[in-house]
Image (tube, rainbow, N blue to C red):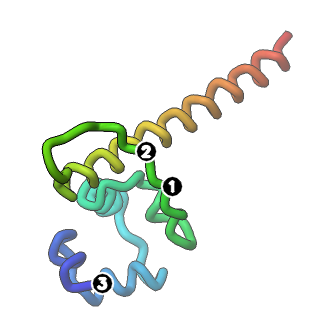
Amino acid sequence: MEEAATKLSVSPNRLAAMEAGEVDPARKQVDNFARVFRRPMVAFFLRNPPAPAPPVADFRTTQGEVEESQAFLLRTLLRDIDARQSMLRELLEWKKSTFALLI
């Protein structure tokens, strides 16, 4: 809790109150949380943390081991791409159904 509060520039007590639902964070704070923790903003409004994505097969060939930070960034990028694809798919389906109603 201390480390997260420091990264977010809030007091540990205030962060605990936010997590307990006693205090609502400002929109700007939620934007900062999403940026710091590399998560979509909506993730901070879920009752429970989202289930972790299944591991992705990694077919890269390297000399030795891949650094954990690089693997983390790749997983973050893939999660972001998957979320954007899902949003786009939903938008296209919504537009398709809305267009069908107009005809």
Amino acid carrying label 2: it is Ala
Q: Along the horizontal axis of the image, is 72 left or right of 49? A: left
Residue, disc 2: 57
Eyeballing the image, is 63 above or below 5? above
Give whichever of 98, 89 is nearer the camera: 89
Amino acid carrying label 3: it is Arg
Q: Residues within 10 Å of mark 3 (few under 14, many from 20)?
A: some
Eyeballing the image, is 26 above or below 99? below
Residue 50: horizontal and vertical position, in percent? 52, 63
Residue, disc 1: 54
Cα separation between marks 3 and 1: 33 Å
Residue 58: horizontal and vertical position, in percent? 36, 43
Q: Residue at x 28, y 54 (%)?
A: 72
Q: Locate the N terminus by quadrant.
A: bottom left
Q: Residues within 10 Å of mark 2 (few under 14, many from 20)?
A: few
Q: Residues within 10 Å of mark 1 (few under 14, many from 20)?
A: few
Residue, disc 3: 14
**Residues at discs 1 and 2 in contact (Cβ within 8 Å):** no
Task: Report helix, strand or loop for mark 1.
Answer: loop
Q: Residue at x 49, y 61 (%)?
A: 52
Task: Report helix, strand or loop for mark 3.
Answer: helix
Q: Nearer the viewer, mark 2 or mark 3?
A: 2
Cα separation between marks 2 and 3: 40 Å
**Residues at discs 2 and 3 in contact (Cβ within 8 Å):** no
Q: Residue at x 57, y 72 (%)?
A: 47
Q: Locate the C terminus by quadrant.
A: top right
